[in-house]
Amino acid sequence: MPTFPFTEADPVQYPGPPPKASEVVIVGGGVIGVTTALFLASRNIPVTLLEKGRVAAEQSSRNWGWIRKQGRDADELPIVIEAIRLWRQLAEECGEDIGLNQTGVTYLANADKDMAKFEEFMRIAAIHELDTRLLGADETAKLITGMSRKFKGAMTTPSDMRAEPWLAVPALARLAVRKGARIVENCAARTLEIAAGRIKGVWTEAGYIETSTVLVAGGAWSSLFLARHGVAIPQLSVRVTTAATEPMPEVYRGAAADDHIAFRRRQDGGYTLAAGGSHLLYLGPDAFRHFTKYIPALRDNPFGTRYFPFAPSGYPDGWLTPRDWAPDSASPFERMRVLNPAPEPAKLRSIERNFKQLFPRFETVRLKVGWGGMIDAMPDVVPVVDQVRAVGGLFVATGMSGHGFGIGPGIGRVVCDLIQGNETGHDLSRFRLSRFYDGSSVRLGPAL
Ligand SMILES: Cc1cc2nc3c(=O)[nH]c(=O)nc-3n(C[C@H](O)[C@H](O)[C@H](O)COP(=O)(O)OP(=O)(O)OC[C@H]3O[C@@H](n4cnc5c(N)ncnc54)[C@H](O)[C@@H]3O)c2cc1C
């Protein structure tokens, strides 16, 4: 059983050196990079995945483990429907228990306005024939037992799933390697080699890899990496706090949330918990550069974000984080192998308090571990999944905006086809990079 959260003190599972050449190079070993590598390798395409720290050590192990169709942006839904089918298939192929269970997702309504929001999603759910339904107050109390508050009602999707992220993504990486992918940990991609508008290779901290195709799936670091090459992505990251309890009696098998608390039953008999309220944005040069693009999100939820004037040293949008570096000198990526923000003590206290208040039968809520994570977000809360038009052979899949774990295998399969020049089977226009620069107005997806 791996220790959690993952840090750079964990042993390297995939040592280098990287190969001298590879048909495809993937930057980033989170769920997006790993699943793309897996699908490429399954099609016998030579692929090398570079991870500056450890596979899944950033967002892809730290997330809540919700795999949901419920509440999704309408354009993401077809991909997440496919992802859920892929999760089942890949869990089987992994041959390891990744905690995948179809236990449902439920959103609780404190007020009529919450029910009205749920009604809006019901229209999208109907188009896709989802099993999502609205519950009244009594049905809600029956579904999740022992709650101190009577909710107005709820929206629930019984076919939604959960998995244990820190088990799932490393298991998918092992599967990718069994299929032929090459993974190299502790190996930052520093810069791209571009000539005559095309990718020629990647400079890493352990040498040069000749390649014609690169996917940037660097999570919170993608914007910093790409900006060095003149590709601007208005991506920012926010800090959030999560905790896991010791084993406790079951109140609900699935995952649920209201404004004050989010909880998911864990495979080990505890709960993964997060308190409602705001997340924390560290202000840095990118936050100011991209401010106007985030105005619609700020208007929609003015109190959803707290601000701090600077990030800890070495963070992607730190004031002192270099924006330019040479291929043969240390880059910001290897200086911060694993982005491992501390959990906020006040948030941990509200997690305990809010969970106890909702379930008074729990006299104590004992947290066995708390952790922080940086969620990478886009102004419209949907990702960028695209080919960079200005640089032949360069692809981007990033900015998953707090919901990239569940959809991960779907994005991985789609990007694999994009790279091969095949039809992807989905309309990706909503996720195009140019939407931020072609005069389109920001169309907000469901909140973070
Ligand atoms: C607390 C929290 C709760 C969440 N809850 C959910 C949830 O319940 N359901 C859901 O669907 N989603 C959830 N998410 C979001 C989800 O975790 C992310 O969207 C998803 O994991 C993003 O995957 P990724 O591969 O894009 O990025 P990451 O997992 O962040 O991986 C990117 C990797 O790239 C590496 N990297 C970056 N730059 C370089 C470089 N230059 N060279 C080499 N390597 C590099 C990094 O080290 C990192 O490991 C949550 C996120 C958080 C933080």
Image: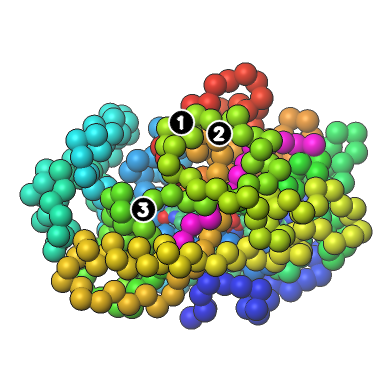
- Please report the residue visible at 28 percent of the width from the left and 34 percent of the height from the top: 117
Q: Which residue is mark 2?
A: 294
Q: Disc 3 beta carbon < 8 A from ligand 1?
A: no
- Please report the residue visible at 66 percent of the width from the left and 38 percent of the height from the top: 288
- Please report the residue visible at 77 percent of the width from the left and 58 percent of the height from the top: 332
Inspect this view and state whether residue 92 appears: no
Mark 2, other Cα within 10 Å: few <14 / some 14–19 / many ≥20 = some
> Residue 273 at what x, y percent from top left?
36, 63
Spot the residue most to the left.
138
Q: Which residue is mark 3?
A: 276
Instruction: Please identify the quadrant where the C terminus is shown.
Output: top left
Question: What color scheme is it?
Answer: rainbow
> Residue 6 at what x, y percent from top left?
57, 72
- Cα distance, mark 1 to mark 2? 9 Å
Q: Secondary structure at mark 3?
A: loop
Of mark 3 and mark 1, the one earlier in the sequence is 3
Q: Nearer the viewer, residue 250 or 208?
A: 250
Amino acid on which disc 1 is placed: Arg
Q: Is residue 259 left or right of residue 9?
A: left
Q: Please report the bounds of the magenta region as a residue range.
A: 230-242
Q: Which residue is mark 1?
A: 299
- Cα distance, mark 2 to mark 3? 21 Å
Q: Is residue 441 left or right of residue 123?
A: right
Residue 115 lies within the magenta run: no
- Please report the residue visible at 50 percent of the width from the left and 48 percent of the height from the top: 306
Mark 1, other Cα within 10 Å: few <14 / some 14–19 / many ≥20 = few
Amino acid on which disc 3 is placed: Gly
Amino acid on which disc 2 is placed: Tyr
